[in-house]
Image: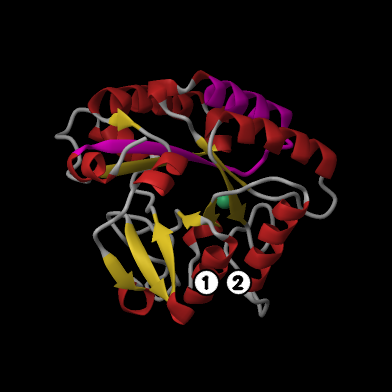
Amino acid sequence: MPHTGHILHGRYAVVSCHVERPLDDQVWKRFSALQERRPGGFAIAALMRLPAAGEDEARWLERARQARARGPFGLHTHWTAPDHARPTGGADPAELVREQGGWLDSVGLEATLFCGGGWYFDERVAEAVADLGYADCTATAFRPAYLAPEAPHLQLAEPAWLELAGERRLLELPTTHSIGMLARGLFARSSAQRIVHAYFHDTDLLDRRRSAALRLGLGVLGRRRTASDLDELQHGLRPEKTMSFANQRA
Ligand SMILES: [Zn+2]
């Protein structure tokens, strides 16, 4: 487990997957195989979308438990629909996060991480995530191209503590690289960030080229940096930076 000294001077990398379609047999087979194989030495975190109405809950649970046994495990909330991640309409985004975290608890699935669908993040969602005891991965080092300038989102290059109301604080472990960014960086100078957090979607694994780029990218990443995982960072990392959520929202 990396302790503070190692983290401060070392160069770590972690990997997460937004598991969007765990009930699709093809997608699940590919994700399972990849998580099992640990490309680059990485224990890939499964950030799972919960079953929606009409989806097979028993099968979902069976698969979630398999993912939980293979690596870090977290909640990936899609607020509107399985294929529509960000919130729409009047419902309270934070309330759904609390509800979904409570459901995971009630079925005995211990989650340690949160990532908001479509990178949606606001202060009340951050409070809900802190109350659930998770670390958060919703901040991104990059600005997602599809977001409108005023869309709620948190941009951060390095891990930090987010100060919240009621003397709560949340460990933020930003997502820093997509598959495309990893692939473009393969032959470039290595990233200056101390912690690289690469992510992909389970559905990317259906695309032969994206899947090959991911495996290649993770292989190179694992040779350039010490492979860690999001649970290990959560236990061992104590960021120097503390910031107020309100002042940092990008
Ligand atoms: Zn998603």
Residue 94 numbered tag = 2
Task: Tell me if label 1 and label 2 are in contact, CB under 8 Å.
Answer: yes
- 1 or 2: mark nearer the eye: 1
Q: Residue 88: image x %, image y %? A: 62, 72
Q: Quadrant of the N terminus?
A: top left
Q: Nearer the viewer, residue 130 or 80?
A: 130
Residue displayed at 31% across by 40% down: 181
Q: Residue 202: image x %, image y %? A: 57, 36
Q: Is residue 209 above or below residue 193?
A: above
Q: Is residue 35 above or below residue 118?
A: above
Give how far apart the Cα atoms at labels 1 and 2 are: 8 Å
Q: Is residue 19 above or below residue 88?
A: above
Q: Amino acid at mark 1?
A: Glu
Q: Which residues are magenta?
A: 10-36
Residue 127 numbered tag = 1
Residue 229 falls in which quadrant of the image?
top left
Q: Is residue 87 visible?
A: yes
